[in-house]
Image: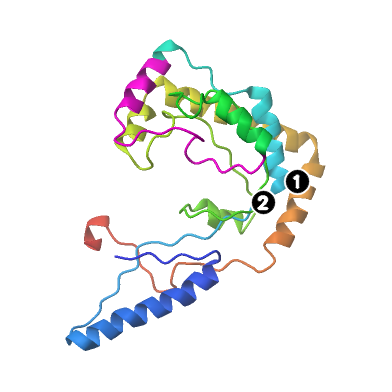
Amino acid sequence: LYMVRSVLVKDALKLQERVDKIANGAALMTETKVVKKFIDGCSNLVPNRCLQELLYKNLKEVGAPKFDKADFDFAKQIVDSYEVKHEGMPEGLKINDEKIKEYVMEASENGTKPLNDFVVPYEYSDAREPGSTDVGDVSWLTPTAQIYVTCFAANSPGHSWQNVSCGNSPIGHKGLLTAAKVLCGAAIDMFEDHGIIETARAEFEKAAKGGYVCPVPADAKPVVSGELI
């Protein structure tokens, strides 16, 4: 099982051809054969600064979720279950501005606070991060932006039971409601000011001028997950 990544899908596809050749070469050496099954593929995310700033404006107006003592107590139990303890900049945040770093470190109590109940100041960055999301494919077709809202305990390991355990808790519910308010506020702003849409569209056309390259092979067919094994 392997995954091939690159900044752009077109480069990842070229790299995958080389990896496939390695598999075929190994099959020749061992007098076996290769049967390839495609699982999934996602495109990189095309950022849109106009929409990012719009979402941040609304996030500041809505504010971070209002967590109570019960939320913090539950989050503390989750944090205590981590095998690897964490201190310093909260996991997932990559900040260059020193003033923002100082603010985040103070607000998160040096990364030890069980819930992040504050809004991180906006900072634009075009730095690349590894990850997989089909939002990337959407962003090649229309202006797209995302926000992140606290829905689970701080520094929770990705794809973990700790994340899942908060999904049906008041923590997750409050986070989702906050995100919904931000998105609705941004939608209202765009309805009332079409200039925002025009600016976002112009930025998108420039950033995505290379055109969308689909990472899914033309002959790929949907399969039941159990059939992949």
From the viewer's side, name the closer residue of 19 and 140: 19
The quarter holding residue 85 reads: top left
Q: Is mark 1 on a helix, strand or loop?
A: helix
The quarter holding residue 34 reads: bottom left
Side of 116 where 184 appears, left or right? right
Report, in whole angstroms, how far the alpha carbon at label 2 lies from the one at label 1: 9 Å
Residue 161 vs 129, above or below: the answer is: above
Which residue, given by chain and number where applicable, does mark 2 sit on? 143
Tell me which residue sits at (42%, 29%) in the image: 152
Q: Which amino acid does label 2 sit on?
A: Pro
Residue 183 vs 8, above or below: the answer is: above
Side of 157 where 140 appears, left or right? right
Q: Does the magenta stretch include residue 190?
A: no
Do the residues bearing badges 2 and 1 touch, measured as CB atoms within 8 Å? Answer: yes
User: What's the magenta region?
Assistant: 71-97
Does the rendering let one see residue 159?
yes
Tell me which residue sits at (38%, 64%) in the image: 3
Tell me which residue sits at (49%, 53%) in the image: 134
Residue 114 vs 122, above or below: the answer is: above
Which residue, given by chain and number where applicable, does mark 1 sit on? 197
Q: Is mark 2 on a helix, strand or loop?
A: loop
| Crowd rating for badge 2 (residues with CA inside 10 Å; few <14, some 14–19, many 20+) | many
